[in-house]
Image (cartoon, rainbow, N blue to C red):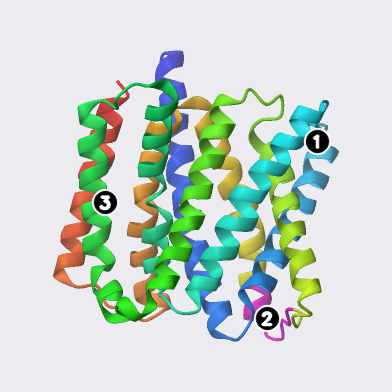
Amino acid sequence: MSQNKMILRSYYWLLLASTLLMASAFVVSKLFIVDGIHPLVLVASRFTLAGALAIIWLSLRRQLETPKTLSDVGGVFLVGTLQTAVLFGTGFIAMEHLSAATISLLTLTMPIWVTGMLALMNRKFPPLLQLIALGVGMAGVALIIGSGVSEAGMGELQWFALALVGAACWASATVFTKTSGLSITGWSLNAWQMLVGGGEVLILALAMDLPGIKLVLVSDILLFIWLVVPASILSFGFWFSALKLGGAAVTSGYLFLIPLFTALISVPVLNASFAPMQLLGGVAVAAAVWLMSRSST
């Protein structure tokens, strides 16, 4: 097998693992929020612990990259603020009122934001095939969870808008990561940005005097471990690694898999229904992923 094929295969495996783990995080987070844990407390606990554990693990393996300049420090804080604090802070607050699949859809409008930002920065219109893929993907995820959006109604418009703010911030972090030339990359950037973002939300939660997280049942403890390690440390580590291998716009397009996986996991875990139109949406998502891969060749 040629080196290019091995890199391409690793890229696709990283994307698959990352999107599947991110999807599981939406479902598990919804379970905790339904149980009464405040969204900001959940964000603070999840990412502060995940960031600290990732830094310790990388340090023990002597693989931890640390900021060496003020520019690097500022970049890490920017990514942590946008990609962890704002994205998940707004998303989890909105998840109190909307379903996990709905939040997943709104968050995953991010590829459209990325494509638009890169087009403005490069003063170059995106390739037609990429635009078609984005359109098909958005149509697919809309079909998958369209019934959930309809049930919520326009009276919940502020929660939809809040999740979209998080998506725009994630897109900004993605574009910055790909174009800024930070000396910290991959797993190290993931660890630092989680610690920064989680720490910012923790300070906010303490200032608001919110009740802490309490895990009584063994199942709750296991779910929280899953949320911290595979669904946070590994998922974002895989994401940054994939982002390093592929372009920001192309890589972000594969995030359309997350709403599909979220909907599938929600069926057995959250007792969600999966209508025929949602199955059709899944086919559209698969088509969008194929088109996106074609646009990168």
Q: Nearer the viewer, residue 69 or 254?
A: 69
Look at the image and give the residue range highlighted in magenta.
213-222
SS at badge 1: loop
Q: Nearer the viewer, residue 189 or 18?
A: 189
User: What residue did someone put label 2 on?
Assistant: 218
- The correct choice, above or below, for 129 with respect to 41 in the image is above
User: What residue did someone put label 3 on?
Assistant: 138
At label 3, counting other C-alpha atoms closer than 10 Å, the crowd grade (few under 14, some 14-19, many 20 or more) is many
Measure how far apart labels 3 and 1 are at the Cα level.
Answer: 40 Å
Q: Choose the circle earlier in sequence order: 3 or 1.
A: 1
User: What residue did someone put label 1 on?
Assistant: 61
* Quadrant assignment, res 75: top right
Query: What's the residue type where badge 1 is placed?
Result: Arg
Query: What's the residue type where badge 3 is placed?
Result: Met
What residue is at 35 percent from the left and 50 percent from the top?
257
* Quadrant assignment, res 146: bottom left
SS at badge 2: helix
At label 2, counting other C-alpha atoms closer than 10 Å, the crowd grade (few under 14, some 14-19, many 20 or more) is few
What residue is at 51 percent from the left and 75 percent from the top?
30
SS at badge 3: helix
Q: Nearer the viewer, residue 163 or 252?
A: 163
Measure how far apart labels 2 and 1 are at the Cα level.
Answer: 30 Å
